[in-house]
Amino acid sequence: MDSLVQITDIIPSAKLDLRYATTNNITGRVLYPEAKAFLVPDAAMALKKVHMDLGSRGLGIMVWDAYRPLSVTHALYNATPESQKHYVADPEEGSRHNRGTTIDQTLFNLASGQPLKMPTDFDDFSEHASPNFDEPDQERRRNRDLLIGQMEKHGFIVNEHEWWHYDWHEWADYPVLDTPIEEL
């Protein structure tokens, strides 16, 4: 297996807002001791192409999450109410995030540094988070659909429940990992 690479080493102008490195997440606890984001090299290089395509529009990617150690998947699963567990990976099976093949992200304006308006914020467990939600706000819908289109163009698959969640199409070729962020 290829090693994981730090996204900002491949895409220096990508913006990080790693929610699990802060208390601004569904657990209310810091789950990553360092604000670093990692992917497998093939996914990182494809993401670079996405970022470059978006750059021609004055936009960039803002990363909310990428590689996630299996131990963090356990913490997220345990913190999620029973009625919403279908939104999070079962740690017994492992997550695609645990493989370093998945990224959670949004778009931001390169000039202002501000995120674009989207249908929801990160980890919204409502129907509004679906990439197929009939978003009434045209600007939010246009931004969401632009991100989905660019990611799909470069080999990523959008999650059926979350417009911000993208799996590298070869995710199944990679093993579940539990390497702590601070050891990468």
Image (cartoon, rainbow, N blue to C red):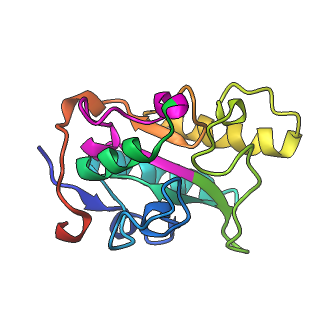
Q: Identify the residue at image location x=26%, y=60%.
A: 5
Does residue 79 lie above or below 83 as drawn? below
Closer to us: 55 or 109: 109
Instruction: Please indicate, yes or no, whether residue 69 appears anywhere in the rendered image.
Output: no
Give the residues drawn in magenta, as a range: 83-105
Side (left or right) of 25 relative to 41:
right
Query: Is residue 98 a member of the stretch shown in magenta?
Result: yes
As for residue 56 lying within the magenta part, the answer is no
- The image position of residue 135, as x and y in percent, is 81, 33
Q: Is residue 50 visible?
A: yes
On the image, the x and y values in percent for residue 71 come to: 25, 51
Residue shown at the point (19%, 36%) measured from the top left:
174
111 over 47 or under it: above or below: below
Rendered position, 28 above or below 100:
below
Q: Residue at x 44, y 47 (%)?
A: 79
Q: Residue at x 14, y 48 (%)?
A: 2
Q: Locate the C terminus by quadrant.
A: bottom left
- Where residue 168 appears, as percent x and y from the top left, is 37, 36
Q: Residue 143 is drawn in which quadrant?
A: top right
Quadrant for the N terminus, please: top left
